[in-house]
Amino acid sequence: MNRYPLFLDLAGRRVVVVGGGAVATRRIGRLVESGADIVVVSPSTSDELGSLAQRGALRWLARRYETGDLDGAMLVLACTGDPDVDRTIAEDAAASRVWCARADDAGSSPAWVPAVGVMGELTVAVSAGGDPRRASGVRDGIVAALRAGDLHARSGRTGGGEVVLVGGGPGDPDLLTLAGYRALLEADVVVSDRLGPTQLLAGLPADVEVLDVGKTPHGPAARQDDINALLVTRARAGKRVVRLKGGDAFVYGRGGEEVAACVAAGVPVRVIPGVSSVTAAPGLAGIPLTHRGMTQHFVVASGHVPPGDPRCTVDWRALAASNGTLVLIMAVANRGTIAAELIAGGRNRATPVAVIENASTRQQRLAITTLEGIAAEPITPPAIIVVGDVVELASMQTQQAQP
Ligand SMILES: C[S@@+](CC[C@H](N)C(=O)[O-])C[C@H]1O[C@@H](n2cnc3c(N)ncnc32)[C@H](O)[C@@H]1O
């Protein structure tokens, strides 16, 4: 039977659902999201529908269906599980010119509910000639392909440029969030850093402008003001600009400055959080940053500016005195002076220390040493340094993992 597919704006419009079981519960989830004025007619309901009624998301008439229940409705979902009642509802609906979707018999129903999948702004609705199993199978296949990025069509919307700060994670593309990946696939312009999932850039369509503003440590880099200006001018030209950062944009990523520049220029800006190397590197090395009975807190500090330098705002002596785990970022060059300061502040010189280089990439390397030994440990950046007893758990887990 040929059907005419349609997406309905149900906000504020009356929808009657007759039945309170599993089918009604499944269908009502999306109705609640649509903002419809929902009335459920059923002597009993599932716990989920009961709590939606308590929260005021729908009205529940705790009784059997009566002719007249459809007054003022534009749509009725007949899901009682009793074909005789569903038929009566369909007849009443036809007499009152209300659209009716029968769960028990789609074939004799003037409307039916498709299998639906939602991925961000995309809604996939599949109908398979009244065969719900086939429809949900196709829906699942499409959603899986969209998630994996195997199926993609860039938005045809024009105008209204924006900047999206995407936290790209520590490097392995698998650690980029789905939201970040979707933003990347939608981008007209990608402004990328040196760290993060840069290998994804090669797979972008040829018409995407890719600009590398990455900075090598102590090497040449685009000035932050120039990066800000680049983001703003491209977005003002109507482009969807993705600013792809390593880790999380708001963790030593200058994301705050870039957002402020966009806001000051009146350019719409969004932030998609990322997996920071601060937690990813220890995690990938099997080091929990907190561990019951061992430590209840961890502190993250940048070692970019050496202790004693007037620009250094980290109180290394105070950190030495605390018994929590220390996570040091950008600390490779100054590791010797930082360790000396921590020992002078009271940390035991034998405190275990882990160095995780290039976390999540093929070059990932874990070295275990002590506070005293860290200065002599050869390290290649980028690296995260973890100081504290939790480091001992890494070797335990590595040993357990051995066959
Ligand atoms: C400018 S900060 C950026 C941090 C980033 N926003 C984040 O959340 O991970 C750069 C530092 O992050 C650390 N880092 C970034 N990626 C890393 C990785 N894959 N492995 C180890 N450390 C990493 C290193 O300490 C490096 O010097």
Image: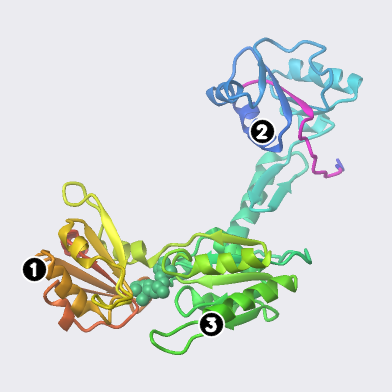
Callout 2 amino acid? Val
Q: Name the residue under label 1.
A: 350
Mark 3 and mark 2: Cα distance apart in space: 45 Å
Q: Mark 3 points at which residue?
A: 213
**Residue bounds of the magenta highlight:** 4-20
Tell me the quarter of the picture where residue 1 sits: top right
Tell me if label 3 and label 1 are in contact, CB under 8 Å.
no
Q: Position of residue 188 (x, y in %)?
A: 68, 73
Q: Which residue lies furthest to the front in this view?
A: 310
Is residue 192 on the magenta stretch? Answer: no
* Residue 107 appears left or right of 257: right
Callout 1 amino acid? Ala
* Residue 320 appears left or right of 313: left
Q: Which of the two labelled residues, at mark 3 and mark 1, occupies the earlier sequence position?
A: 3
Callout 3 amino acid? Val
Q: Mark 2 points at which residue?
A: 32
Q: Where is residue 224 in the image (x, y as percent from the top left)?
A: 53, 78
Tell me the element at label 3. loop
Tell me the element at label 1. loop
- Camera-near label (3 vs 2) is 3
376 shown above or below 366? below
Tell me the quarter of the picture where residue 361 sits: bottom left
* Residue 396 appears left or right of 306: left
Q: Residue at x 43, y 62 (%)?
A: 275
Disc ID at residue 178: none
Tell me the quarter of the picture where residue 354 sits: bottom left
> Is residue 243 or residue 361 the one in the foreground?
243
Q: Residue at x 16, y 47 (%)?
A: 293
